[in-house]
Image (cartoon, grey):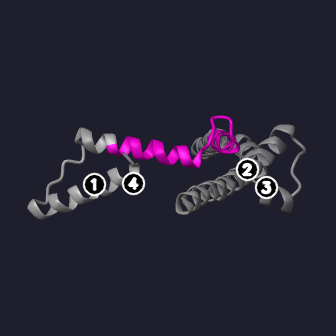
Amino acid sequence: MSHFYLIKRFMRKINCDKKKSLKLDINSTKTLQIFKSSTNFFLGILIPHKLSAESALLVAIATSFILRSISDIWMISNATIIESAIITMNQPRFRSSLWKFLAAMPAVRRKFQFENSILLNFISFKIAVINNVLKWTIGELKIRFRANLSKYLFDQYLK
């Protein structure tokens, strides 16, 4: 059976059930089967092979999200150190942690010349690169998914 046929049949069932009552059992096994089969069908169209460019882009996006989370955790922990220095009124610790925090931000680093710390340069560079890689891979994946889906639909139309 075609996946499109199953979706149409499912939609007809929903419309009939809406007329009878407002309750619809979304967690039924048939609904989950249709959802899983449709999802697998569309993923098969969007991602043609396990070792395709689309798969590599998905791995790059996942890796970028993990690295971005690590960078965010570093920024949060550094901000917490600044807050604790404020609460304890420890001025030397406050100054050093504030400079580290500001030096990690690319826009601030360019405007003011901070100490040439390798760690701060790496963190600043890493945050900027991760954000740009994430933006590029998501855009590239959208284009590839759109192209794969258009190609499939065009091939179906020509049959």
> Which residue position is annotated with label 4?
4
| Residue 110 in the image, given as x and y percentages of width and height | 85, 59
Compared to residue 49, the image places residue 158 above or below, namely below
| Quadrant (top left/top right/bottom left/bottom right) for the N terminus | top left
Picture mark count: 4
Q: What residue span does the magenta drawing correspond to?
A: 34-62
> Which kind of residue does numbered mark 1 sit on?
Arg
Compared to residue 19, the image places residue 130 above or below, namely above
> Which residue position is annotated with label 3?
106
Q: Which mark is residue 133?
A: 2
Tell me if 72 is positioned left or right of 106 in this view. Answer: left
> Which residue position is annotated with label 1?
9
> Which kind of residue does numbered mark 2 sit on?
Val
Tell which circle, 1 or 4, labels the residue nearer the N-terminal end. 4
Tell which circle, 2 or 3, labels the residue nearer the N-terminal end. 3
Residue at the far left in the pictured view: 20
Local SS, label 2: helix
Q: Residues within 10 Å of mark 2 (few under 14, many from 20)?
A: some
